[in-house]
Amino acid sequence: MHRKLLIGSVVFVLVAGLVLAFGWIAVAGKMSDQADKVLLPQTNGPISVNLNLATEPPTLDPSLSSDTTSNSVIDQLFIGLVNQDDETADIQPELATSWTISPDNTVYTFTLRSDAYWSDGNPVTAADVRYGILRTLDPATHSGHLSSFFDIIKNAEDYRIGIITDPDLVGVAVVDTTTLRITLEYPASYALTIFSFHGTRPMPQWTIEAHGVPTWTEAANIVTSGPYRLSEWDHNDHILLDKNSTYFDAGNVQIEQVKMWMVGENTAWQMYLDDQLDTVSVPSGTSLDSILRQGVHTAPTACTYYYGFSKSQPPFNDPLVRKAFSAATNRRGLIRDKLDGIPQPALTYTPPGVFGHVDGYSEGVGIPYDPTVAQGWLAAAGYPNGAGLPPITLWFNTSDGHKRIAEYVRDSWYNTLGVSATIQSLPWNDYLSQLPDGLFQVWRLGWCMDYPDAYNFLNDGINRNNYGGWNNTTYEGLLDSAVLEQDPELRKSLYKQAEEILVETDAMMMPIYYYASVVATKPYLERKYPIGGFGDIATWRITIAEETIGTSGGSLTSYDGDTVINIPAGTFDDDVILIQTPSYGMLPGGDLAGFGLVFDLEAVYADSGLPASPSQPYEISISYSEDDLGIIPEETLALYYWDGDQWVKEPSSVVDTDLNIVTATPDHFSNWSTLGEVERTYLPLTIR
């Protein structure tokens, strides 16, 4: 999956002593309100998830998309020739089941699956892939910077800039319905990654030509090939996706409906707390109790947050001014005061984890915070103490997080240079459309890895128009040499020289920090955490288990198979829906410890949805493994329930250490956990 221009609000949160669901520690305090909430599945509706896009997608057209919001939706609607794994970025088959590469590494021949269909029933063919690629390259499509990704394809660049007009000269050929051949201009080790991009996806020519752009992507017209189809697009409010029955792997898609909201980060967080969203970015500065912390996933991502300068807009036509403003920006203070110390300050563009990354602080590349140097550069440019400078405006796309950062940077410039700057924002769509005009003096963007090579940042991630038509022939030459260089060390050296030009010599860019992802997810949702966006939602799973139980009794098995609930006959006087939901619970204290197995058990009458209680004892049986035990003595394991203030041992609980099973016969439903007693050593305090 691919993520480009990052628009999401800043989502860093300090989680001191992060506790995940599979590792308990003792924490004093009262049970959070979150643990007392009962979240019932939609027993009469589709299996669904609710997410937040944060803003209106600029487009759902694969040939036009270059931002994470649009791509997050497109990922669900259109299959690719090949796919990138959400967690490793490894290339995987998708429409193509296999491929061969010529000895000189310039000809790729793809064998396509024959069971892929569009949502209107038409087969997905090699011709649809060729059409999609050529459409993206066609100057009439106005794909902009996106189309330059594909210049590795033979004659692609000449075709997209109009030097040649015959599409048959482009190195994309249909051999037959299920065979596609792509010829490159030169060997490129990252070619397969390029072939996974949105602009190379098969596209429905008949639908696009019938409805035109952008109307063909509206819910009433769009034809899709991915795991979902577009059912609703209520602009600036929500998008609704429903499972696509013609998707080749529909049998493995569990989640049947995806609702994507478009609300701000603070509203989204409240929706998560109110059980209206199933996963969400955590706003900066959010206070998390011990329950909420268990659902937080934190990880570095290969993305960079940065400010750019337009050299066509005075005073930033002068490199000394650009350098002065960069040196006047206190990155570490910003991260400490506004971003809870989570992200890593950046002096270079290419982030850690990507080939060609340069550690600016240790290698002396980039412009660090230095007020004295900043003041000297500004004076040398003819503006001592900011005197004589024209009005300065810092631009960003509308977001609470981006605003906080802009305010801090503005204040940093004032305190260091004596310069008063104005901050200004635009909605994402308007921002993206106006940025290439080069009229914004200083502006923000983010860029995430498409493939793990610095070329993806230093070339693909630099729209020269945003910088007021910046063109440095030395910089371009270094990148041209790097993309052909086969020696890894020489390529690193070339990339380092290019970084130095970008962030120091010309100082066109001011990198600010490398992103980190902080996301909260409900305990019943299994998902992956890719770099930007949602990745393949088709691989997510809702792990709530439910079963209709009649008056004659029945049983329910948890999603993971480890928990079995047996209900004897006569427990209920009418049909009920028994529901077992993985949950987060208050961490055990004192001499209790657990291994993260917590669940809610409840029942509702099938006809009314009202709560139902058992009229007699029933059986809970929980399997565990030796690896689960950790420091817990196996013979002390028992089932505990939460009484509103503490964990209470269920009197009927017994453990079979031979079969590794804990069983109990309680007479009530509750929030349950398997806990054990541990011996804690307390060292004596000696007072001298």
Image: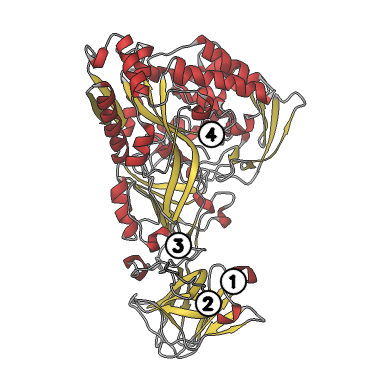
**Residue type highlighted by circle 1:** Leu
Q: Can you tell which quarter of the image residue 669 is in?
A: bottom left
Q: Is residue 299 above or below residue 467?
A: below
The image's colour scheme reads: secondary structure
Residue 215 x, y percent position in the rendering: 37, 34
Which comes before the other along the chain, label 3 or label 2?
A: 3
Q: In the picture shown, does residue 473 fall above or below 58?
A: above
Assign the C terminus to one quadrant of the image: bottom left
For disc 3, the marked residue is 523
What residue is shown at x 55% (from left), y 83% (from top)? 663
Q: Disc 1 to disc 4, how far (Cα)? A: 41 Å
Task: List x then y, in percent, for residue 174.
Answer: 65, 29
Q: Is 313 placed left or right of 672 in the picture?
A: left
Mark pair 1, 3: CA separation: 21 Å
Residue at image mark 1: 629
Query: Type of residue at label 2?
Result: Gly
- For badge 3, the amino acid type reads Pro
> In the structure shown, which secondary structural element does the residue marked by tag 2 occupy?
strand
Q: Residues within 10 Å of mark 1 (few under 14, many from 20)?
A: some
User: Which of the two discs, 1 and 4, labels the residue nearer the N terminus?
Assistant: 4
Residue wearing tag 2: 676
**Decide: marks 1, 3 in contact (CB < 8 A)?**
no
Count residues near mark 2 (Cα–Cα under 10 Å), then give few for <14, some for 14-19, many for 20+. many
Label 1 residue SS: helix
Mark 1 vs 3, N-terminal side = 3
